[in-house]
Image (cartoon, rainbow, N blue to C red):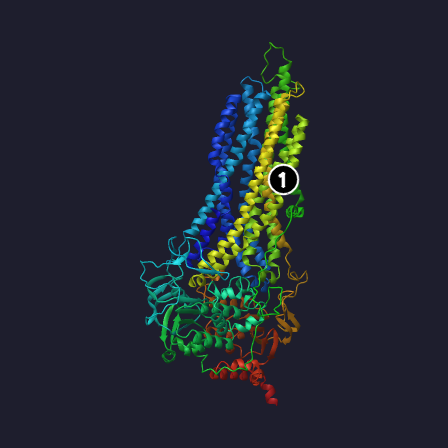
Amino acid sequence: MKIACSSLIYRKVLRMSQLSIGEVAAGKLVNLLSNDVARFDMAFMFLHYLWLVPLQLTFVLYFLYDAAGYAPFVGLFSVIILVLPIQAALTKLTAVIRRVVAQRTDKRIKLMGEIINGIQVIKMYAWEKSFEKVVKIVRAFELAALRKSIFVRSVFLGFMMYAERSTLFITSLTIILSGTLLRADLIYPVKVFLGIVQINLTFILPLAIASLSELNVSLGRIQKVLVMDEREDLSLISANEPLIPVTFNGKPSTLATNSIVVRKYSTTEKLSRSSIVGPRSPVLSEYVVELSGACASWTKSNEEMTLKDITMNIRNGKLCAIVGSVGSGKSSLLQVLLRELPLSSGNLNVKGSLSYACQESWLFPSTVRDNILFGLPYEVERYKEVCRVCCLTPDFKQFPYGDLSLVGERGVSLSGGQKARINLARAVYREADIYLLDDPLSAVDANVGRLLFERCIQEYLSGRTRVLVTHQVHFLKSADFIVVLKEGSIKNMGSYDDLVKSEVEFSSLVSDESHEDRKTEKDNKPILQHAVSKVSVRSTENPAEEKAQVQAAEERAKGNLEWGVIKRYLESVNSWLIVFLAIFAVLVTQFGATFSDYWLSYWTNEVDKYEQSLPPDVYPDTSLGTKMGHLTTGQYLWIFGGAVLFIIIMTHVRIAGFVMMTMRASQNLHDVMFTNLIAAVMRFFNTNPSGRVLNRFSKDMGAMDEILPRSILESLQMYLFVASVLVLNALALPWTLIPTAILLVIFVFLLKWFLNAAQAVKRLESTTKSPVFGMINSTIAGLSTVRSSNSQYRLLRMFDDAQDINTSAFYTFLGGSSCFGLYLDVLCLIYLGIILAVFIFIDFGGLVEVGSVGLAVSQSLALTMILQMAARVTAELLAQMTSVERVLEYSRLPAEENMETGDTRPPQSWPSDGQVQFENVSLKYGAEDPPVLKNLNFTIQSGWKVELKDAVTSLDYNVSEGGANFSAGQRQLVCLARAVLRSNKILVMDEATANVDPQTDSLIQTTIRRQFASCTVLTIAHRLNTIMDSDRILVMNRGEVAEFDHPHVLLSDPNSLLSFMVRETGTSLSGALFKTAKDKYFSENEEILKDK
């Protein structure tokens, strides 16, 4: 069921509508796959006890009646009347608390996902301490609910300590008041049977009910996800339909499953169209895209329409450009064509297969080639041609493994332009009738953008229908049809010449940038190349070698669990006094339990002596005042009752102490792990997928929070039980220690043999869970791309493979546990048989007291049951301790230097100026990586504006996870506003306006120059018109400073790289750029020129 639910959740994600994806955070899905589905393990482990326990109790109650009449029932039902209502209330409370814990854990994991994805920004702004406070607040709320949950669970375990003894006390009182002496042959059979009842009623049955109650909560959470809205044209094919062949790791395969996601169109919609993807087929219609009166909204209420009354037709084989200001609905229009954004009204007709290049480049952790092929067959010539027209061939020569180099999660090892071109190549490689290209040119410079437009969009895709969203308006003259959007509506559409003459919105968009015929490409053009960070440990001496780079495996400890892990866990409580008091409470509680068992034996021995001292014709006195040995019957009874009361009190004291100890440890370990994580170097985040990191904060923290406290308490309790048995047997019959010692030696040997394998398998199970979480995060990020390319099959196979590996490790652990339990059962049966055979077949005469025999037999029988439980809880304890081990691993992450500035604080006015100076600066991403910056030497004076060439309705508007409810341009504006509001002396903008229209870009540049007139501004930009009035331009090439001077000085040199890039923009625009740089230069040097 756990595997089935995990698969259902992932398959549901592949079918979810974009509205549903926006409602469910990736952190919640990770929590469902780590903690909620794990509830099946415990629930199904105890499921059969729901019918087995009542059946066992039927037989046990009969044996109790046969042994002692109605007296045991008085004690039993008295305790049941007291305990069962409490258990029922606690079970109900468990479900309520579990729901609260799950919700708060969702919130914490969601926050962790946001932090991991935005770690670079957090480090840039030095927000580590601020986010640490936020996480601690969220964690405190989670721990408040967890503390209640652990306390309730511990109370269930506490019943096991005193339920049997409470029943024995009431039974003993009933027997005495009924006029019968408390003899050993009467009370010890009752004690043995009550022990079975205790295990069933106070431990197994409550645990089964509580587990099922928690499972019910988890099922409700899973059900909420499974019933969320889906894309209306997605369904499941039946097992009778043929499977579509796919490729996995370059090998053809088919998916043997009857739940593969494909597209099926609703018969109730006003839509008539063919499949979105599939083999390219000839399209005979004049119009391949027809929209009529289309309205769409990203909200369910449809109160705010994203697109309003869109009516447009796109001819077959033509290039249609869509332009508009930020937030005008350009990307949403493409989502409508992809059927990701459902229509509220209107008609849509799309004829032909689609291929889609998303605006924010989506890459998954694999090789560059895999990201381009994305499940399609590798056709060498077509692949090479696609890479050429997408300007990727020069990059492959730099990569350590060529196109077989790993790109890392989200393409962290690549530049923005490289990611954009790989993203474009994936769409182009796929044969389709219609290509939807969402602003693919914004992340590249002018030269590369021109090559992409000419080679790829115009030439390679000629004859195909292309829908291009762009802010690069100087390419619009080449478009066959242009659509101008404003605030979700079409303001105008037509050809370039028609729109220029119309003098409406289009005129303002193209007023600053015009397009002229490009020069023919020259063979001697200077080539600008980017460096790439290398994740591998090997340089590429033979670029032609077809050897794929392998992603580094997650580190995991080996061998037996070190005692240092347990020591570190106890140290994390930050109070040895609390640790001592918690353990002392356990010892004192067990001492009380041992004393009560011994006292019962001592009492029955005195009763036996009393009966033997009476003459044959004298009946024993059964009153409470009868003297037996040194005490009366009443005194024996009240001492026994006092011991039971002491156990009840100390059990709850022990629970409170352990809850305090374990919760403090969980809190401190989490805080230490997070503090070290957020202080880690960026290299760590670039080489570790988010799923791997989230695994520590979800599955490992869940085990440490909820399972480990119970395991510690159970382990201590079981081994103290074993020690108690040894002490009582030594006091009763010392010779029983011989077979007991042999049993324990064999038990320890078997346990050590089992734990060696169990720990290794449990570590493997923990590490193999990371790819499952990574798949969820990656799929959500690129869901539109996945569905538009019909790659659900491939991802399903990858997810199932990752889950199969994880499940195989889990079932290996379960199989080993079952095998070990079988061996232990056989061993305990042999031991118990020896003990019973000795008492049955050997006549000890008067050497052995009857009470001591009863104590020895009952303790030996209890020992066989306790050893089984001790083995189970020990294995579980060490298994959960591997989670502590993995959490502690993150407390030793390589940290950034100078995280703290010490007590010395700079003055409030610091820095007074914004000078930036580089002296012989070189940079590597890793110790074994090639340098990406090489020997940089330049100085940026305070107040210089240096360029490096390489709209919200209200302030209280909620931002969803990842800012998904904003367009890419709007997200850039929000980030830019955040940087501006900090009012620092140095402002660094890395492609901060790449996804905004030229009009908005111009406004932003003007505002920055006015607001930051006295500050130093470093801008990385590809739009040359926005940087020509800078004080200096720094041109980088292959990690080195190629040029650094005033724009006019650089443009005065016809052989400079900047001159080449400006000339490539065309005659009209290049002339404007030359003039801007010249005017800026002469305005700054006016006085000097006059003097000359």
- Residue 959 visible at all: no
Looking at the image, residue 108 sits to the left or right of residue 578; the answer is left
Q: Position of residue 506 (x, y in %)?
A: 40, 76
Q: Which residue is mark 1?
A: 750
The local crowd at label 1, few if under 14, some if 14 to 19, many if 20 or more residues have their Cα within 10 Å, is some
Q: Secondary structure at mark 1?
A: helix
Q: Which is nearer the eye, 335 or 525?
A: 525
Residue 374 position (above or below residue 468): above
- Residue 223 visible at all: yes
* Most distant residue in the top direction: 617
Residue 178 position (above or below residue 1006): above
Q: Position of residue 635 (x, y in %)?
A: 62, 22
Numbered label tally: 1
Q: Position of residue 197 (x, y in %)?
A: 52, 30
The C terminus lies in which quarter of the figure?
Answer: bottom right
Residue 1067 position (above or below residue 802): below
* Most distant residue in the bottom direction: 1092
**Quarter holding residue 343:** bottom left
Amino acid at the residue labelled 1: Leu
Residue 59 position (above or below residue 584): above
In percent of the image, x 44 and y 62: which residue is there? 784
Q: Position of residue 189 (x, y in %)?
A: 56, 24
In percent of the image, x 44 and y 74: which residue is there? 460
